[in-house]
Image (cartoon, grey):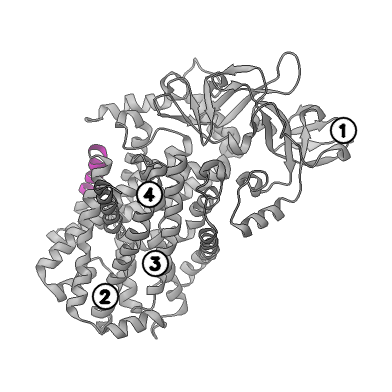
Amino acid sequence: MSLKRLFEVFLGVLTAFGGFVDMGDLVANAETGARFGMGLAWVVVVGVIGIVIYAEMAGRVAAVSGRPVFDVIRERLGARTALVNLVASFFINLLTLTAEIAGIAVVIELATGIDYLLWLPLAAVAVWLVIWKVKFSVIEKAFGLTGLLITVIAVALWRIGPDWGALIRGATSPTIPGNETLGTYAFFAIALLGAAMTPYEVFFFSSGAVEDGWTKRDLNLNRANVYLGFPLGGLLSIAIMASTAVVLRPKGITAETLGHVTLPVALGLGKLAVGILLIGMFAAIFSAAIETSLSAGYTVSQFFGWQWGKYVRPREAALFHVVVIVAIVLALAIGLTTLDPVQVTEYSIVLSAAALPLTYFPILIVANDPTYMGEDTNGRLLNTLGFLYLIVLVIVALATIPLMIVTKGGA
Amino acid sequence: MRASDLLGSIVVDRDDKELEDVQDLIMVQDGPPIGPVGAALRVRALLFGTPAIGVRLGFARRDVRGPGPLRALFSALHGRLRVATWDQIAAVEQERIRLRVPERDVHSDIDLSGAPGRVLDAGLELLDRQMIDPDGRMAGNVDDLELTFPDGGGPPLVTSILAGPGALSRRIGGALGDSIASIHERLQACDLEGPARVSFGVVVSIGSDVRLAVSRKDLAIYRFEAWARDTIVTKIPGS
């Protein structure tokens, strides 16, 4: 491997790492840390292994056959079922986009003190402008790398110097705290799973592979990104959980806003570090907003067969850009109804978890189809894991809506 | 006739016994030469059986290998699949395929290993695929196929790919499909009738995508994209 190639792989891993955490991960991990301690850390591990398995498959299918995820969904499920899938995916993606745009606005509120509702339209326009003007590879790298600043949370945690033994014991022998029920425990388990495995991640990852012109030769890059970048992102998620478990939980604060995420950093490292964290959060959430906006365009265009992508000029992919604009406008409209950003985020990740089989099942099938994959079909181990996850995801999907009702949204 | 007219139709034998629904069209590329792709596709047989997603996923006939438990599950679900060859068909009626033979003469499979051309299951390997033009631009999906009976008799040939909402509506079916069709009809430019057509004569290859020999800009399906480009996108600076 040449030095240039090695650097490319290294950069890819860092980008995947920095881009892993988004509004959903921040909210879910901070909230569960504050309410359940480390008792749900194992779900993050389960979720990260799941996204690693399926993102690798989706990236490999895209690199080998040139087919991104929604092409595959349409080809395997047929026009009718794929349309149902498209409607569900678009709606959930729209909720996710709403959460991300609101997240950007809240981060600016934290930095400026001016109410987030005023920043919402600006955030939406900024997201669209970057999509319209900036090259795909630049977007990916600039925001992914800046997102790495969130690791300041891990540094703060280390500075605070918690009882590491207790943290690890809490994670390895999880218990449900006395003031919580099995219902809320399960609800937040699903939220964490949905946050780690959000469908837009595979829509974006596989379409991004086509945008970047991946071929069979890039399979190593695919593996490096997924096998190294995503688990590092997962570790960061657990660090967020640990930080609120250590700082907020003993005081009985339940991390209901994004501002609570900054408290451990303020305590451990001071004001400047909070500034650094806010920049990192801004970049990470902003890049997720771009990814979800693009995913709206990717899924619809791929279902209908329209030209999509940032690798051509907007006028060459007109309908794609129209869908992106429509999605951003709709998300902004939902955001402006003053729905609580954290609540929107919770609903978006929980519903994401319920919709996961819709996305992941066709990927698993096509990754086994030699007419698409030639000799690069799944191995036995991967198929076993993929199949086990599919069973888990189906159970989660069936349990989600009843749990939402029973626990009144985890309250 | 369209591929969607055959897919999902019920097969009825000589004695009016209702068998099962058509799941896929087995085609052989052994028709008259049609263009860069070579010979035209001819419908050779209908694959029918109880509706089952396993067929659609490729577990039934293609060598989709795993995961093992899924393969076993879907094989069990689709039960038996049977094949009616085209010469066993007496008539194609509205949502009914009438056979000229009794049920016992229907085969459980068809051996096409010695076929004079490529064998292809249209539903699995051609429908819903992405079309790509010579510049590498995406030019719509294969939403349906137009089948034409040749003058000299014999099985129908694939003569055009149908694309866009006008074709998709029938695949989606039901009230939603009907409303898509009527909206499409009303919005469509008046010089066009029916769904956008791509002559099978411009098809270059059929793989994980369908490659075309003409630019998407010369196809009827491009009109919607062109409209969005001219009325919205190029009005924004930097497009």
| Residue A132 magenta | yes
User: How many C-alpha atoms fall within 10 Å of the one at disc 3: few (<14), some, or many (≥20)?
Assistant: many
Upstream in sequence: badge 2 or badge 4: 4
Chain of the residue where label 4 is placed in the rendered structure: A
Give the percent coordinates (x, y) of residue B181.
Answer: 55, 30
What residue does disc 1 label? B101
Give the percent coordinates (x, y) of residue A278.
Answer: 18, 61
What is the C-alpha distance between the residues marked 2 and 3? 15 Å
Chain of the residue where label 2 is placed in the rendered structure: A
Give the percent coordinates (x, y) of residue B16.
Answer: 87, 36
Q: Disc 1 residue type?
A: Val
Point out the residue furthest to the front here: A1
**Frontmost residue, A331 versus B152:** B152
User: How many C-alpha atoms fall within 10 Å of the one at disc 4: few (<14), some, or many (≥20)?
Assistant: many
Marks 2 and 4 share the same chain: yes
User: Considering only vertical position in the picture, is B80 above or below A45?
Assistant: above
What residue does disc 2 label? A244
What residue does disc 3 label? A192
What is the C-alpha distance between the residues marked 1 and 2? 74 Å
Q: Circle 2 sits in a helix, a strand or a loop, which is it?
A: helix
Give the percent coordinates (x, y) of residue A276.
Answer: 14, 62
Q: Disc 2 residue type?
A: Thr
Upstream in sequence: badge 4 or badge 3: 3
Chain of the residue where label 3 is placed in the rendered structure: A
Marks 3 and 1 share the same chain: no
Q: Circle 3 sits in a helix, a strand or a loop, which is it?
A: helix
What is the C-alpha distance between the residues marked 3 and 1? 59 Å
Q: Which range is magenta?
A: A121-133
